[in-house]
Image: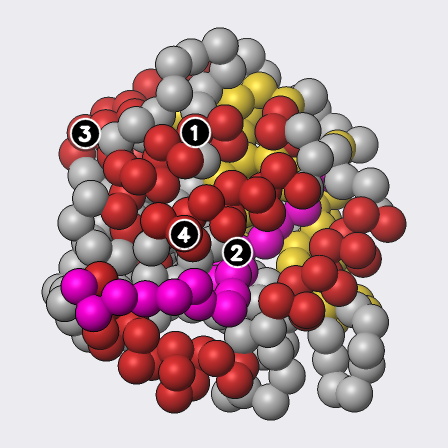
Amino acid sequence: MFRLAHLSDIHLGPLPGVTYRQLASKRITGYINWQRNRRRNLHEGVTERLLSDMASFEPDHVAITGDLVNLALDAELEMAQLWLESLGPSHGVSVVPGNHDAYVPGALERACRTWDKWMRADMAPAITTRHGFPYLQRRGPLAVIGVSSAVATAPFMASGSFSSEQARGLAELLEKAGAENLFRVIMIHHPPVRGATATHKRLYGIRRFQKVLRKAGAELVIHGHTHLATTHWIAGKDGRVPVVGVAAAGQGPGSSKPAAQYNLFDIDGKPGAWRLTLQRRGLKGEAIDPVTIASEDLR
């Protein structure tokens, strides 16, 4: 059995010092939002409780589907690098960026350079731009495939994009991993499902993404962005593919969104007869420590 842990939307805080020059961009709206809302509801302490609980289950690999930071300031990207290093060897953690990691033009490239150890194919050069995605990592029976939907957007927008360039690369990697009889996990920040989030937060290229899965197949898609624990299904080459979201790992209690959670996937079996179970763990009610929120059999 292989155990995969899934975290997303950590939104590491607190914010470092911000200059007026840095706020002369879309960051001004994000900064105001942080001060009015996120500062009260996103707490680094709850993330640490999740990580401690997650470690007790001894996952074989950890997947993080974006939004490690808030405004993509250089100091935030460096802080996230230190946080990633604290999780253990880079071989055991895979990352894809989210819209907050690409908050303004140029931020995504800086994030890729800073977090390159966690966002590159095995035995391949570092990813330094969005053109380095998708990437493929082989971990036990898994093919972990990282796709980037992160793009800089206008103020009050949080949409993502799945390009034709990435579609061609994803189809090739899925077919290669399928020929190797690997369990294929696709990581992406925005949900590739219609109606999963508001229009201004949607993924552009959903039809393109789903077309790739109908042609090449996959066993699991994981995402973040919505801060919700959800399971959707989309058509694949050999049957339905589960698309699983997770509540924000940095979300404190008392918000309209669920408090901090992470996902644990147990994967067993063989091609054509894979077994996949999901356990959602996180904060609930007055509980101080994470508990099991729900369990699902996905195969």
Quarter residue 262 falls in: bottom right
Q: CA distance from mark 4 to mark 2?
A: 20 Å
Which of labels 4 and 1 is toward the front? 4
Could you tell me which secondary element the residue under label 3 belongs to? helix
Which amino acid type is marked by label 3?
Answer: Glu
Q: CA distance from mark 2 to mark 1?
A: 18 Å
At a point 26% along the width and 57% down the height, the residue shown is: 103
Query: Which residues are the magenta region?
Result: 3-21
N-term mark: 2 or 1: 2
Quarter residue 209 falls in: top left
Residue 294: x, y in percent?
Answer: 73, 68
Instruction: Assess disc 3: are there few (<14), some (14-19) or many (≥20) residues with their C-alpha within 10 Å of its C-alpha.
Output: few
User: Which quadrant would the C terminus be assigned to in this image?
Assistant: top right
Residue 260: x, y in percent?
Answer: 63, 70
N-term mark: 4 or 3: 4
N-term mark: 3 or 1: 1
The residue wearing badge 3 is 165
- Magenta stretch, main secondary structure class: loop
User: What label does residue 75 carry, if any?
Assistant: 4
Is residue 51 placed above or below 147 in the rendered structure? below
Which of labels 2 and 3 is toward the front? 2
The residue wearing badge 2 is 8
Could you tell me which secondary element the residue under label 2 belongs to? loop
The residue wearing badge 1 is 116
